[in-house]
Image (cartoon, rainbow, N blue to C red):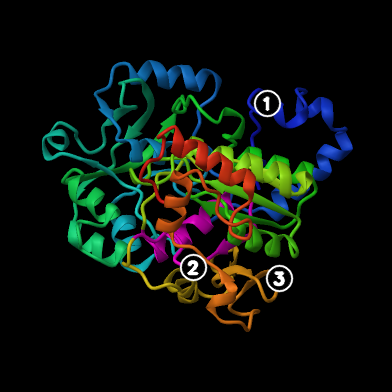
């Protein structure tokens, strides 16, 4: 299996400012390479790497300068980044028609590999008319900075309502994921990409680790089993509890918040990251947790996105993945445990990552500890549970939620954010 490529400069903070070679002996590095390649197989085979290097990079950049340019939406830009770094392995570009239709209807690529979410590039009919199948185009960010070249193997029409029904289980345009499908272009472009420059980011630089880099950290720490945790919200006591339950049976935790495009009323990423930092600093063993960010956009596809999130974390090197209540849900579009039940639709071992299912968790005053409906016999009066509205009102008034619900350090960050009017109406 191809070894994971390490970006030495970007990863210096992981090794105390020194290079990996300087911090590990040759024998230790060989051992850790064995751990990384044998334990953390990417989805469908070797970890995909679509980033050009050296002379190839210069050649593609020069070629791109003479091509028609297509500016990507924020979601497509996130998809391009994850394609480039292998987060979407085994994909090597935006889906062609056969893969797209197979994913929508069967949750599998035409190769038979499980994949639940279509990764597509939509353009208007006018844009599509100017692009010939078999031609190359340059892909750029919203500012026009060119990042990649795509060979357009196919352009094809698609049924928006069918995609909405199959992927999001609703045709309601009030659903944010459905709305995104309904407003995107009429034609999908499919074909491989080659990337010579990743999108630039002004935030979280020390946490933007690629799958190759997280695998390297796992190997350096000797982690053979790693559980991934997806979140787009602050981590309160209930989340902390299930993470630590999972840590009892694995070597390490990848806390992997999503920092791509989300709904306007979600907590901003910079606020959430401050919450994660103070929580990990005060309540987690430093050598058993890695905080990194996932650049993906949120799709709010509920059950299908739960599987998608698991496969992406598999590519980042995780062997296990936490699936809680209403994972990746929004509103009342999905049942409480639909995101857990969907894993039963795949053959044992087919996904190559072990889902860890958790029920509703809370602090029970009579048990005097964190618990779940599986372990606590007491009724609701003994359980410390708060609605999102209750928590928002408390924070806006400068009142911290009970310590049984949220760590005081996390509450302080959220109160400060509320008072700064960074998140006046966001869901907590």
Kindly check if marks 2 and 3 are in contact, taking CB atoms under 8 A apart as contact.
no
Nearer the camera: disc 2 or disc 3? 3
Q: Earlier in the sequence, mark 2 or mark 1?
A: 1
Q: Residue at x 44, y 28 (%)?
A: 199
Q: Position of residue 232 (x, y in %)?
A: 47, 49
Q: Quadrant of residue 136?
A: top left
Q: Give SS at disc 3.
A: loop
In this rendering, would 239 be left or right of 194? right
Kindly identify which residue carries mark 2. 325
Neighbor class of circle 3 (other Cα within 10 Å; few <14, some 14-19, many 20+) is few
Q: Position of residue 360 (x, y in %)?
A: 54, 71
Q: Give SS at disc 2.
A: loop
Structural distance between the alpha carbons of marks 3 and 1: 47 Å
User: Can residue 319 be found in the magenta stretch?
Assistant: yes
Q: Residue at x 72, y 49 (%)?
A: 283
Q: Is residue 128 above or below residue 202?
A: below
What's the magenta region?
301-330
What number is the disc on residue 368? 3
What number is the disc on residue 221? none
Q: Give SS at disc 1.
A: loop
Structural distance between the alpha carbons of marks 2 and 3: 23 Å
């Amino acid at each position: 299996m191809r070894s994971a490529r390490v970006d030495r400069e970007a990863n210096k903070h992981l090794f105390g400012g020194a290079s990996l070679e300087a911090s590990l002996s040759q024998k230790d590095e060989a051992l850790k390479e064995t751990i990384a390649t044998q334990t953390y197989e990417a989805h469908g085979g070797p970890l995909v790497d679509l980033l050009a290097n050296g002379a190839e990079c210069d050649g593609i950049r020069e070629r791109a300068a003479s091509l028609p340019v297509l500016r990507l939406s924020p979601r497509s830009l996130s998809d391009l980044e994850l394609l480039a770094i292998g987060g979407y392995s085994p994909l090597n570009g935006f889906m062609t028609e056969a893969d797209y239709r197979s994913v929508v209807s069967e949750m599998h690529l035409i190769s038979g590999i499980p994949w639940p979410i279509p990764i597509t590039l939509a353009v208007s009919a006018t844009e599509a008319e100017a692009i010939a199948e078999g031609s190359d185009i340059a892909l750029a960010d919203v500012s026009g900075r060119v990042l990649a070249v795509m060979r357009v193997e196919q352009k094809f029409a698609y049924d928006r309502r069918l995609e909405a029904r199959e992927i999001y289980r609703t045709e309601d345009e009030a659903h944010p994921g459905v709305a995104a499908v309904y407003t995107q272009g009429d034609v999908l472009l499919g074909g491989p990409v080659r990337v010579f420059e990743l999108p630039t980011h002004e935030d979280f630089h020390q946490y933007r680790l690629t799958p190759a880099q997280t695998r390297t950290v796992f190997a350096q720490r000797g982690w053979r089993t790693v559980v991934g945790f997806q979140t787009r919200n602050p981590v309160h006591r209930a989340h902390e509890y299930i993470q630590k339950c999972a840590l009892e049976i694995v070597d390490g935790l990848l806390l992997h918040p999503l920092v791509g495009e989300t709904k306007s009323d979600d907590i901003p990423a910079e606020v959430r990251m401050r919450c994660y930092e103070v929580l990990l600093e005060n309540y987690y063993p430093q050598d058993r947790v890695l905080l990194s960010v996932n650049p993906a956009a949120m799709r709010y596809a509920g059950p299908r996105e739960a599987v998608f999130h698991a496969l992406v974390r598999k590519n980042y090197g995780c062997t296990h993945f936490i699936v809680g209540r209403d994972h990746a849900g929004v509103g009342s579009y999905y049942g409480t445990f639909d995101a857990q039940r969907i894993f039963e639709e795949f053959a044992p071992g087919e996904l190559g990552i072990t889902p860890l299912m958790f029920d509703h968790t809370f602090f029970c005053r009579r048990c005097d500890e964190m618990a779940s409906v599986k372990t606590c016999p007491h009724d609701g009066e003994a359980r410390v549970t708060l609605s999102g509205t209750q928590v928002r009102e408390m924070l806006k008034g400068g009142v911290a939620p009970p310590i049984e619900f949220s760590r005081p350090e996390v509450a302080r960050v959220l109160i400060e954010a509320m008072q700064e009017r960074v998140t006046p109406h966001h869901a907590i």
